[in-house]
Amino acid sequence: MYSIVYEKSAIKDLVGVEKPFRLLIKEKIEILAKDPDRLKNRIKALKGKEYKGLYRLRVGDHRVVYQRKDDVLIILIVRIGQRKEVY
């Protein structure tokens, strides 16, 4: 099981999300920590040199941008927000 670590910007983003969506996003992040393969159809690697090593998790109209560190079993949440705001 992975540990979840949030960057300060991600926490600020999450607080700004409406409560029903916030709860759903937290639920999906917990599933991601327990079994990343369970959400594989909602996950994509981001393209581009500046996004190397980052992935996005689709949760409705919201996106969770994260980095997965397999060597230390950590998922670092970088950004959370609506699709048009995150990229």
Image (tube, helix red, strand yellow):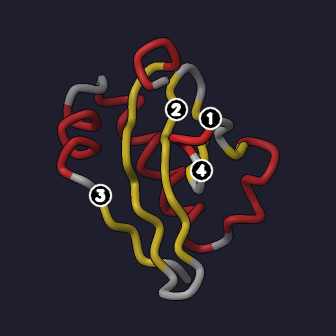
Q: Which residue is mark 2?
A: 63
In this view, the residue farthest toward the top is 84
| x and y, in percent, of residue 77 in the image | 39, 54
| x and y, in percent, of residue 60 in the image | 60, 25
Instruction: Say if mark 1 contacts mark 2, CB within 8 Å.
Output: yes
Task: Please report whichever mark, 3 or 2, sits nearer to the chain's N-terminal start.
Answer: 3
Taking depth in this image into account, of 10 and 59 the one nearest to the observer is: 10
Q: CA distance from mark 3 to mark 1?
A: 17 Å
- Residue 87 - label: none
Task: Please report whichever mark, 1 or 2, sits nearer to the chain's N-terminal start.
Answer: 1
Q: CA distance from mark 3 to mark 2?
A: 14 Å
Question: At 48% across and 87% down in the image, what residue appears?
Answer: 72
| x and y, in percent, of residue 13 in the image | 26, 33
Taking depth in this image into account, of 41 and 45 the one nearest to the observer is: 45
Instruction: Say if mark 3 contacts mark 2, CB within 8 Å.
Output: no
Q: Secondary structure at mark 4?
A: loop
Q: Secondary structure at mark 1?
A: strand
Q: Is residue 13 left or right of residue 67?
A: left
Question: Which amino acid, by three-letter code, is at mark 2?
Answer: Arg
Q: Is residue 29 left or right of residue 18?
A: right
Task: Please report whichever mark, 1 or 4, sits nearer to the chain's N-terminal start.
Answer: 4
- Residue 6 - label: 3
Q: CA distance from mark 1 to mark 2?
A: 5 Å
- Determine crowd level at label 4: few under 14, some 14-19, many 20+ residues with C-alpha closer than 10 A: few
- Residue 58 - label: 1
Question: Which amino acid, by three-letter code, is at mark 3?
Answer: Tyr
